[in-house]
Image (cartoon, rainbow, N blue to C red):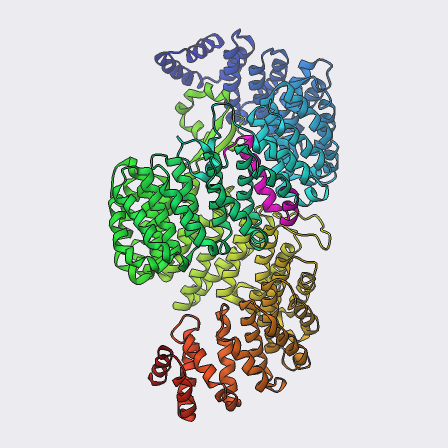
Amino acid sequence: MAQVLHTILTNLLQPDNAVIQQATVQLKEAFKDPQIIPALFDVLRGAQELQIRQFSAVLLRRRLAKQWKSISQDQQQSLKTLVLDTIQREPEHKVRYALAQLIAVILKNEKLENWPEFIKFVLQLSHSNVPDQKQVGLLVLWCSLHVCASHFQPHVADLIGLFRQTLSDLQNGPLLYYTVQSLTSIVPHVVGNDTNLLRSLIPKLLAAIRQLIQINQDQACEAMEVFDTLMEDEVSVIVHYIADTVHFCLEVAANKSLSDEIRVKALSCITFLIKLKSKSIIKQKLLPQILNALFPIMCAEPPAGEMDHEDQEDDDEEIEDKAEVQTPKGYAVQVIDMLALRLPPEKLFKELSPLMEPCLQSSDPYQRKASLMCLAVLSEGCADYICKKHLKSMLNVVCQALSDDCQVVRNAALFALGQFSEHLQPDISNYSDSVLPLLLDYICRVDPSETAHLTKAYYALENFVESLGNKIEPYLPTLMERILTCLRGSDNNRVKELSVSCLGAIANGANELLLPYFPAVMECLKVHLVQTDEKGRPVQIQCIEVLGILARTLGKDSFLPIAEDCCLLGLGLCDRIDDPDLRGCTYTLFGALSEVMKDSISLHLEKMTTLMLLSLKSKEGVVVHYNENRSFLLFDDEADEEDAIIEENEDDEEDPDIEGYSVVNSYMDEKQDACLSLGEIAYNASSSFFPYLDSCFQEVFKHIESPHVNIRKSAYSAVGQFVRSMNLMCQNNPSEANSAALFCLLSHVIPSFLKGIQNDKESAVVMEIIDSFNQILKDIKGHCVRDAKQLEEICTVVKAVLQSKTACQDPEVEDEDEQQAESDCMLIEYAGEVIPLLTTAVGGSTFAPYFAEFLPYLLNKTKHSCTDAEKSFAGGTLAETVVSLGPAVVQFIPQIFPALLSLTKDEDGEVRSNSIFGLGALAEHGGQSMHQYYPKLLSVLSSVISTEENKHVLDNVCGAVSRMVVSYPDGIPIEQVFPVMLRVLPLKEDFEENSTVFKCIVFIYEHFPQQVIGQLKNLANIFAHVLGTKEIKPETEEILIHLLKDMAQRFPQDLNNAILCLPEEASAKLKVAIGSA
């Protein structure tokens, strides 16, 4: 049979389809013969042709993977002996590799304890003096570890000892490669004391990869994956040698003679280290070395006659994608981005500024570009720091660079301005009068045919206008004229796509100010929404996205008349066009429409949910990459049904033919959009969504384990929305069944949230989880907390975040005054928000013992040496928790009062505002225990009100005084305090305090009416200012109107005299209020 099989395999390798097809049929028939396995072994051992032997080994592996258990023990033993003997005799690497994979599959089925010869074989060859035999031993070990590393866990210490020896053989390149790959496979299975053994390997590992770079750069690049694995699973191992590792990676990254791939890989390792161990980077003073190595890479000129990828004109990729192209130069910028996200801004700017500033003045355009790219990526991670200290100067630099003679520099300036506009809101909008005309003028001067250049200009413009709010109004006619003209007159689809996208940004900024343009906008959009030309698809998709934005921004009354047509349009497009981008945008549109339509969207829910669930279940977009052995399996599709079923159930991660996976981003984005939209629709449609809630929850819940960050974020968000939707169902349709369904959801969701907060390695995901949890707490309150045990669990997780002990945080112990990265502070702020919400949910008296455990941490963050962000967070959290604790706050007054009092003198306005609000809350809820502090508190507030210029702080002073008056009027000289407070009114920024302020005025009127009547002229002006505005809530307006009517009855002459002193418009407003029914 072996000879027949040899002929069949030879024919399968012929370049003739007819011959291959006939041979495939013959091979299928041969596989039915019970002697197929011995025959394949005979071919494997006897064929002269390399490809035939390799083919035989691959077929044997695929066969034995499925049928090992079904062959006799004698045959199994014979095969195990044969395969070990065969690989020793085999001279060719490709066949050895296929044989090593065959051995690995046998081992996976047999287990180590049933094949003692395997260990003996590997150790014997690995310790051989013959280099070739060493390579075979480690090749077999690597392939086996790749397939079934868990089998080797009891032998980890022995393996590490072996690796220590083989890593020392620096002249044997393949041996080094197999050793590092073997180590990479075993690292996730190293536990306990064995971790210490790994640590001593790091110097040898660095030396081995350094040597491997000289021998085979491709293998060295693959070998460097070991650093990722170590950082992912055993970061403590590498931290001991973090300086050596960083120096090695910088050395590789800076070496221009090496390939881009390995240089990028080195930079990637540095980025990962910064992400995980930023505090070690600072403590070991590695930051200057990293920056000094990065800057020459970023400043490098491209080869003669070429341009950097992001500056090329013939490419229409998104500008954000271009900035992240995998070249050393592009990736170096991403390292700066990670430094900005993970390091304290003060420390980063101190080291970076001396490098950037000379480059900004350089005559070399690529040095100027490098500095601008740095400024751009600093804006996300260092946003607060920049806004407080550097925004004006940095913005001036970028705006000046828009006039640079070199297009490369102008491109970088546009990217920087776009990044500033995205991350430095709302502060940057204060410069709209200078920036917006500059951008509009710039766009007018760009040749429409230069679409890549135009894309960058529109990127900056879009991001700038998106958050302008009312400040966009003076520029709206100019912006809309340009956009509508392009949409009506341009023949260039890219220009139209950019124009529509910009229209969406304008809508987000303008909101209802866009209403006068709505008919014209819809007229332009309709043309592209119904078009069928595939070349116009990007414009069509952008139009769908803008429809969703318009639905959210223009208000229900304006959009509801066309909402039904938009539903039908979206559903029809999903039926006709198979495009993940289009489906994703359409799902987002459905979410926006649910906000407008509410329950009336119910007619379409079955079809919408079906579409989105199909998208979530789809495996499209995941591309499997196979090694060379896969090319021998062309006939695999023809396998018999039984084999096909077994094949389908195999674990792909353990398939030796799979080298890796890649994903098509648009399919991942589609899943993200599906999750978010399902959550939004569930909440907005409420009761109508109930029939679909279970199926949607089951599918979305699976995606909280997705490897893709944005999908996990959107899944957690949607799960939270499902719970809130079920709660609305319980409120609108109370029943035991509905209550049971809500508690069932909570029993799954709350534990998964707590697990995610502790274990997810991405801070963005953890912040999303905490935000979703907070939304549930606000809505459902005490029902979120099943019992005292769960309350304890929640508090434990919150404390873990506050103490930087979760998986996404660097747990290294900080110095007491150590500064934090802004992203670290933001995560802690999210966790801090849980404390007052949880207090409200379970009640102040219940939560007081738990709050006592949080209090020392919060008080520690009020110290003068803490950052503004930390003090603001601590003051704000204390203040909000005081309100939530209510009377139970009494026991904490001696600790909280002095801490908040000290913050009233802080240099930062937000810190002062939060502390003053907290002091007022203490006065309101502290009862008699606060009376002794009134003189001191009144003195401090009097000092603040006489010197303070920050409007928000002054608003909070008014709120605090109002709370003091209502809570303990005998402790306040109202005749002195009331006129001073009125001089600050009306409130300028913190309109939430209006409810408290006007409640106080009513209180004084009821108890000390002459104090109010004596200030009636001032009060009339204040009342006229706020009535009929959004500055006060409807219930506050009702209280004011009632007050005015009472005054008109009791003190008609005084009120009439006060009204006569007002301007005509204000006077008329009060007269209407008094006369209203």
Residue at 63% in and 31% down: 226
Count of marks, rendered view:
0
> Along the horizontal axis of the image, is 803 left or right of 783?
right
Task: Examine the image and state in which quarter residue 472 appears.
Answer: bottom left
Q: Residue shown at 66%/20% (left/top)?
A: 175
Horizontal and vertical percent position of residue 1026: 42, 75
Horizontal and vertical percent position of residue 374: 56, 41
Residue 68: quarter of image: top right
Q: Give me the residue at 52% from left, 81% from top.
A: 1000
Q: Is residue 268 visible?
A: yes
Q: Where 1055 sits versus 850, above or below? A: below
Magenta stretch secondary structure, dominant: helix
Q: Is residue 816 above or below residue 971?
A: above
Q: Position of residue 392 (x, y in %)?
A: 54, 51
In reply to whether residue 85 is colored magenta, the answer given is no
Query: Quick check: 51 left or right of 872?
Result: left
Residue 536 location (% of width, % of height): 29, 38
Q: Which residues are magenta?
A: 325-352
**Where the C terminus falls, by quadrant?**
bottom left
Q: Quick one: 966 or 140, which is closer to the camera?
A: 966
Comparing 762 with 517, the one in front is 517
Camera-side residue of 445 and 640:
445
Tell me the quarter of the picture where residue 802 sits: bottom right
Reply above or below: 85 against 220: above
Please check the rendered image and state whether residue 328 is part of the magenta-colored stretch, yes or no. Answer: yes
* Residue 610 in view here: no
